[in-house]
Image (cartoon, rainbow, N blue to C red):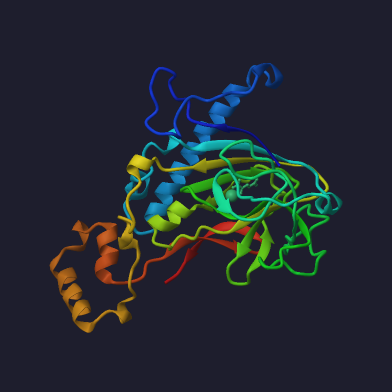
Amino acid sequence: MFSVFPRRYPWPKDQPPNNALQGPNIWPDSDSLGEDWRDSMSALFRLMVSVNEAVARGLSLSLDLGLQDLPALCQGGDTISLLRLFHYFPYSNDAASNSNSSGGGSGGGSGTGSGNRKDDDDGSAKAVASTGSGTGEENCGNDDTGNSGGSSGSQEGSGAGNIGSSPHTDWGLSTSILQDGAGGLQFLEQATQRWVDVPCAQEDALVFNCGDYLSLLSNGRLKSPVHQVVTTGVERTSVVFFYYSIPASTPSYPSPLRATTRVPAQEQPQQTRQRRRLQRQRQPRRSQSRASRGRRSGRTTPCWTSAISSGVATLQRQQP
Ligand SMILES: O=C(O)CCC(=O)C(=O)O
Ligand SMILES: [Fe+2]
């Protein structure tokens, strides 16, 4: 796999960066990529920021918080977020047997193992291969990985395929992925511990992925799923946007959004429930914020969680 380059925020040349992640872009030679290329990438970067900001607003509401509560913790994130273009070379198991394995992971995540994607910065993955598995319920172009090893895709047994990006979670707030028709992106379904293919038939579909930071902020209510990329006999390209929060706005743990972690009413002492009921009766409902309403009622509120349904990576509403 080859990372073309990280596309960072268009930081002004005369302004010193506030932290190590900020700074001007270093663009590849424009001659080889054409005149319009930088503009296209810049426009895509801005679009990805907008999409992720909009999703953050939606997630904030789904956590029973105010519209801007979650986005407020992502202020300035666009100055350190990354847009990366990946090229996964066609890969066969024959090549794997002649290669050494080494550490993996990816530009925006933490993981183990190895892959045949070559990351050119961030000190992460080195080129090479491993025997991995990657079997999914839907074979999304994985002709030489799907179900060939008989291990049906548990994380332990992920051995039959070719790992393009080893199992990892992304550490930012969220990740948005555009993949081509080659497929290969898989999520580990928690309930079954099986790898499930993310459908790739629709090339303009944007896959949204919760990151570790979002998981921390929501006190685990939003899951940061383990995922990987398996490669096949055909080359694959993906466009991946890692949306980060700026360190200065990163709160300490536990999350200031800890109100989203609700204790079910039946688990609370009787006295506490009575006192809260009285408080609710005294306070007109109109004047209560969404968050405090949920807190006072002591109910578990629905949340969105990254999940796999019929092989589709979606955000699913989870009922209490
Ligand atoms: O290339 C992809 O589709 C996803 C890559 C990925 O998960 C990552 O770089 O963190
Ligand atoms: Fe990832």
Quadrant of residue 179 within the rendered picture: top right
Instruction: Give the residue drawn at x 83%, y 56%.
Output: 144
Instruction: Give the residue drawn at x 37%, y 67%.
Output: 301
Report the residue that reaches farthest toward the right. Answer: 94
Q: Quadrant of the N terminus?
A: top right
Report the residue that reaches farthest toward the left. Answer: 282
Q: How many marks?
A: 0
| Left or right: 113 in relation to 306 | right
Residue 110 in percent (x, y) is at 55, 52
Task: Please tell me whether residue 51 is drawn above or below residue 136 in the rendered image.
Answer: above
Residue 75 in percent (x, y) is at 36, 39
Query: In front: 177, or 5?
Result: 5
Residue 298 in percent (x, y) is at 29, 72
Task: Please tell me whether residue 136 is drawn above or below residue 208 in the rendered image.
Answer: below
Task: Please tell me whether residue 233 is drawn above or below residue 306 in the rendered image.
Answer: above
Quadrant of residue 253 within the rendered picture: bottom left
Q: Quadrant of the C terminus?
A: bottom left
Residue 44 in percent (x, y) is at 56, 32
Report the residue that reaches farthest toward the bottom. Answer: 270
| Left or right: 310 in relation to 300 | right
Query: In front: 278, or 40?
Result: 40
| Left or right: 192 in relation to 46 | right
Instruction: Give the residue drawn at x 30%, y 62%.
Output: 259
